[in-house]
Image (cartoon, coloured by chain):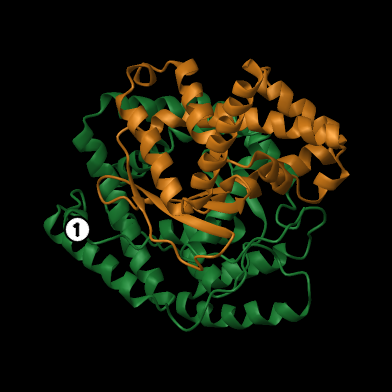
Amino acid sequence: MAFPLDIARGLATLAFAVVASAAAAQEAPDAMVKRVAQEVLQIINTDPKVAAGDQQRIREVVETKLLPNFDFERITALAMGRNWRQATPEQQKQLVEQFRQLLVRTYSGALTQYRNQTMDYKPMRGDAAATEVTVRTEVVRQGGQAPVPIDYSMAKGPAGWKVYDVIVGGVSLVTNYRDEFNEQIKNGGVDNLIKTLTAKNQGTPAK
Amino acid sequence: MSAAGPSQGANCAPSGGSAAAPAASVGVVATALLRGAALAAVLALSACASTPGRPYDPFEASNRVMYAINEPLDKHIAKPIAQAWVDYVPTFVQKAVSNYVNNIDDLFSGVNGLLQGKLDKAGNDFGRVLINTGFGLAGLIDIASDAGIPRGGEDFGQTFGFWGIPQGPYLFIPLWGPTTVRDGTGTILRFVWSPTTEIPDVALRNVIYGLGAIDLRAQALGATSLLEQASLDPYTFVRRAYLQRRQFEVYDGNPPPEKDED
């Protein structure tokens, strides 16, 4: 009797997964950015461990709340530019993983700077049926200082909307890393880039 | 938006045909700005003559030396001073210094708004300067921001860009930071034409320059640790971020999409 029960349970889980991903796919990209940003800001402002600078907790927040909404393969491919196709599948896998780690570290380091910040969410322009959009937000600053715009380039895939570039005050993450990656590749190929990223992530100062 | 849109400004144009367009707008700007702009144009155009390797950074080798010189200077002198300023000087004094510098920047923002035909921005900026200079103790208090008048944020470098003058070579200046021939020329103009130069008391004038410099460094205190964290090669990272940022500013937040380049 155990066998049909397992099947039923399996089907139920599957159905739940389908429903969940359908819900994720239906959420509009700007609504998604707003929801995630508010969730994360809420944690930054109220979580005592985050306030105390607990790195493990901060990283956990980044991993569980932010990262699922990023398409790291696409981010890495874009940052690689035309070098991406020269990399072997194994190299590509390593690049995505190492770049992901670097961004987690960077985001974790920057996260607490958003403490007590207010975000403004701009109405989205463009076609409702589009599969690529830019969601515009602004960090409001005090004392007459100009707000800092943060734009998210997002694409719609089978798992819903994912971020593939972040543009802070006009500085695109992907464009900035493209120069860095190019430089490393020029000085020793794709393997050199993987080596540098790995060393950086392991905390050994890159020479 | 005005009718005349800004043209591509980040790189030196390699083709011969486009050289005429910047030259024509050089004429327009030069008449308006006299020698300063002419100097900028000459620097920018002559710099375009030698561009092997990365077209936007022909002086990369010497720039990297400057970057290396800057690091210990910043770490052991500029940054500690700025940190002490933030930690020990009363907030209202810090604020007054920022406001004084901003007030002069607003004046130049107004001038540059006019030079680009952005009358709304220029109106805001000149209004800010009048209010803050007249009622805010020569700019020490920023009443205009409390009244909700936004800052234009224009400068000479953006005006040159608006009229099609390319950035010219990238430069890294110790204790100043990233700039380009075009933007650096704009910065020089901003300082030589600043009303601060009219202050007869040399000692006071120098104090104002000194405090302004500390204020500038203090604004960027949070950025350095992030840079260390994020970058594989800080020099490249700063360069690309600077050039992207300036392009964004020249186009008032709507730059054309970047081409995939080396």
- Towards the viewer: A17 or B110: A17
Residue at left offset 63%, top offset 23%: A4
Q: Name the residue under label 1.
A: B144
Q: Position of residue A54 (x, y in %)?
A: 43, 15
**For the N terminus of chain A, which image quadrant?**
top right
- Towards the viewer: B177 or A70: A70
The answer to whether residue B232 is visible is: no
**For the C terminus of chain A, which image quadrant?**
top right
The residue type indicated by label 1 comes to Ala
Position of residue B170 relative to residue B86, above or below, is below
Q: Position of residue B106 (x, y in %)?
A: 32, 60
Name the residue furthest left.
Answer: B135
Q: Tell whether B38 sits left or right of B233.
A: left
The answer to whether residue A87 is visible is: yes
Position of residue A204 relative to residue B196, above or below, is above
Dot 1: element: helix
Residue at left offset 33%, top offset 32%: A42
Q: In which quarter of the image is residue B62?
A: top right
Chain A visual colour: orange
Q: In which quarter of the image is residue B174?
A: top right
Position of residue A116 relative to residue B84, above or below, is below
Q: Tell whether A204 sits left or right of B34.
A: right
Name the residue furthest front.
Answer: A1
Q: Where is residue B90 in the image (x, y as percent from the top left)?
A: 21, 30
Residue at left offset 38%, top offset 21%: A50
- Towards the viewer: A165 or A145: A165
Chain B visual colour: green
Count of numbered badges drawn on the protein = 1
Q: In which quarter of the image is residue B97?
A: top left
State which chain disc 1 sits on: B
Residue at left offset 47%, top offset 55%: A135
